[in-house]
Amino acid sequence: MTPVFADPDSTRVGFAKSILESAGIESFVQNENTRTLGPKMFGFSETMLNEPQLCVVDDARAEEAAALLREHFGSASDAGEWICAGCKESNPGSFEECWKCQAAKPE
């Protein structure tokens, strides 16, 4: 098990998992529900909680998986996130339409 991607937004982690599944790389999400417990519930600060992270099962495919994710999310970080005019949801910069309501990305 090798972690290849982490993000506080579990939808982005889920999307990364689907990219790996499409390439035939078996993976799973670790710490998937940690953030939903609530930081104050156990007296921890939010920074002490673990972000959801995507791990590949076959360590030999970790670099391949990381490269696939860099291809996709590298361009997303360059473009920055955008807010949907229709539903006000935040979307990764690489998305051409809103993940929630499918409205087109503003020009």
Image (spheres, grey):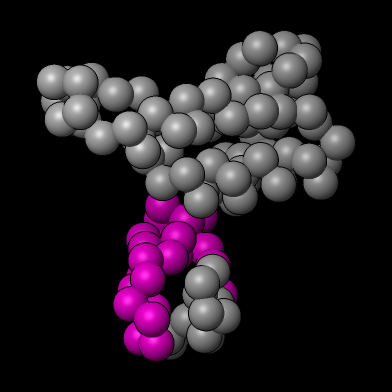
Residue 83, horizontal then vertical, whole percent: 34, 74
- Is any atom of residue 63 visible in this view? no
Identity of the residue drawn at 36% across and 23% down: 50
For residue 95, which quarter of the picture?
Answer: bottom right
- Is any atom of residue 39 visible in this view? yes
> Residue 44 vs residue 107: left or right?
left
Find the residue positioned furthest to the front: 41
**Is 77 part of what is drawn in magenta?**
yes
Residue 10, horizontal then vertical, whole percent: 47, 44
> Residue 7 vs residue 14: left or right?
left
Identity of the residue drawn at 57% across and 80% down: 102
Front residue of 106 and 10 = 10
> Residue 49 vs residue 94: left or right?
left
Identity of the residue drawn at 71% across and 28% down: 27
Vertical side of 4 occupied by 89: above or below: below
Front residue of 106 and 15 = 15
For residue 80, which quarter of the picture?
Answer: bottom left
Q: Quadrant of the N terminus?
A: top right
> Residue 37 vs residue 32: left or right?
left
Give the number of callouts.
0
Q: Quadrant of the C terminus?
A: bottom left
Front residue of 38 and 17 = 38
Vertical side of 53 occupied by 102: above or below: below
Residue 32, horizontal then vertical, whole percent: 50, 32
Residue 92, horizontal then vertical, whole percent: 45, 60
Q: Which residues are magenta?
A: 75-96
